[in-house]
Amino acid sequence: MNNEYEQKTPILSFYSGGGFMDMGFEQAGFEIVWTNEFDETFAKLHAAGITSWRKSLGNETEAEIFNTKSIVEISSEEIINEAFPNGKPNFFGMIGGPPCQDFSLNGKLKGFSGERGKLTVIYLNKILELLPTFFVMENVTGLVKRKETSEFLNKLLKKVKKEYHVDSKVLNSLNFGVPQNRERVFFIGIKKNLIKGNTKPNWFPFPVNEQNINVLKEYEWGNMTPFGENPVKPLNLKIELCVESCLVSPENELIIDNAKEYFPLKPNLNKLLNIQEGETNRPSFKRLHRYRYSPTACYGNNEVHLHPYQNRRLSVREALRIQGVPDSYVLPSEISMSKKFKMIGNGVPVPLAKVIAVAVKEFIKAKKTSQ
């Protein structure tokens, strides 16, 4: 194989947030060479979290957001100059999850006409300007489930498909070891010169779990239980798929970073004691179940997740764990918890990002060795 492909493939990361998708790609052996995040506080959180995580692995490379401008203001020439000062390589990738609130089925459904929706258009345009070897785009399922947005998206993808073979699939993080029911759609694009001939539908080998099952339906989960009582753990249920695996005990709160960071409940909220363990079909103040998965982590505004059996909200560390983020990823105490929870909820679960990255890496490697 050409030495060019034996080296770590460089990645441009757009809408980087806390760097959860970046972490998955780094774990799979890629190298993040350029990042972009417009929110300055998120950029600080990203730098601290990724740097501490890398150092725990013996990598002393400090993380930083290379560009904090709005993606609307950044030219492709500027990106290339920052990412590749020695010239654009022949082989590199792009990853990103454009802000998705305008497509969320729980949002106002502004679609591509919304300010955030337009950022998806810009991301696809950047692909055609930069022409990476491959790209990954992640978004909420509302992007493909609503007829109006799906039709407009297909028009955008027609342009992209002149240069790339494109495939997509909805994946649930729960199927990949993350204790969270989080469905997202992933788009994979590979340059046509890497794949000879026409591709059949569903040509990309999207990852599946080892059992090749739908975890949500195949397992028996804990039953709703009055707060303060002890529910029974169903037989054969893997604890790593349960919220219990993410919780920090009171005696460990002071020795685990970010574990003591949680918003206090106001005294007049004693009525929350009436919310049962596992009562998550509420608009807010959802009490998680120790022997169930978490609903989609989307913290902020009125979305509040309560601890299963302590009368408090989840901590920053527990929320990070629900996103599959290692404890070595540490956030600064001086930055507001509101920002931390919002950033965490925006991220791609790290284990899900990793299996996507591995699938891309193995697919491209197979194509290169066959040529």
Image (spheres, rainbow, N blue to C red):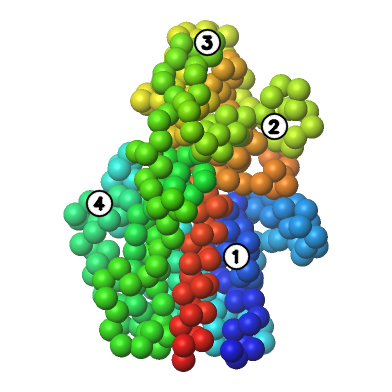
Query: Is tag 4's residue or tag 1's residue first in the polypeptide sequence?
Result: 1
Query: Is tag 1's residue or tag 2's residue first in the polypeptide sequence?
Result: 1
Q: Write down the residue under mark 4.
A: 145
Report how far apart the C-alphas of labels 2 and 4 lie in the structure. 37 Å
Report how far apart the C-alphas of labels 4 and 3 lie in the structure. 39 Å
Q: Residue furthest front?
A: 235
What's the residue type where badge 2 is placed? Ala
Residue 276 locus on image (x, y percent): 44, 15
In which quadrant of the rendered image does the N terminus lie? bottom right
Query: Is tag 3's residue or tag 2's residue first in the polypeptide sequence?
Result: 3
Q: Determine the secondary structure under disc 2.
A: loop
Residue 21 locus on image (x, y percent): 55, 57
Q: Which residue is drawn at 63% across and 69% down?
A: 29
Q: Write down the residue under mark 2.
A: 259
Q: Determine the secondary structure under disc 1.
A: loop
Q: Write down the residue under mark 3.
A: 229
